[in-house]
Amino acid sequence: MEAGRAEFLARLEADCPGVVATFGRYSAGFLHCEVADFRRATEQAMDAGHLWEAERHFRLVEDLLVVAGPELRNALEVSYLEDLALGECTPARCRAIKERMPLKLRQVLIGHDEKWR
């Protein structure tokens, strides 16, 4: 069975408690917006130097991509990975990505922008 929005939200709440509660009020029900809010939570974790938390987010994305249906896969690839890749490459974010992001995900970022190398 392919994972969709319900599986994403359930796994996110189980693996990263509290993140769903930070979603913007206009994001609810819109998968790409919810995934973008999740990406922003990852960026906040990296900016705060919480590498363990950022790694937990990265691992969740990696796990979900294996079982994702087309809609969830697209949301994760575009609203999480591509938007993350095109975002600001601060020292804290570069450190988190280089030290904690699984290699396959990092290669996707590098594919979008070489600054993550």
Image (cartoon, helix red, strand yellow):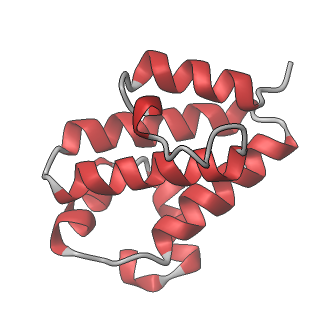
Total label count? 0
Q: Is residue 100 left or right of residue 85?
A: left
* Residue 58 in sight: yes
Q: Which quadrant: the C terminus?
A: bottom left
Residue 21 lies, in percent from the top left, at 42, 30
Query: Quick one: 114 or 88, which is closer to the camera?
Result: 88
- Quadrant housing residue 115: bottom left
Q: Is residue 36 left or right of residue 88?
A: right
**Residue at the spot x=58%, y=31% of the render?**
63
Residue 84 lies, in percent from the top left, at 47, 66
**Residue at the spot x=54%, y=40% of the render?**
61
**Residue at the spot x=64%, y=39% of the render?**
28
Residue 7 lies, in percent from the top left, at 68, 22
Query: Quick one: 25 or 74, which is closer to the camera?
Result: 25
- Quadrant housing residue 64: top right
Residue 94 lies, in percent from the top left, at 26, 68
- Decide: is 116 above or below 71: below
**Residue at the spot x=72%, y=23% of the render?**
6
Q: Is residue 3 left or right of residue 109?
A: right
In the rendered image, the residue lying farthest to the front is: 25
Query: Quick one: 12 or 69, which is closer to the camera?
Result: 12
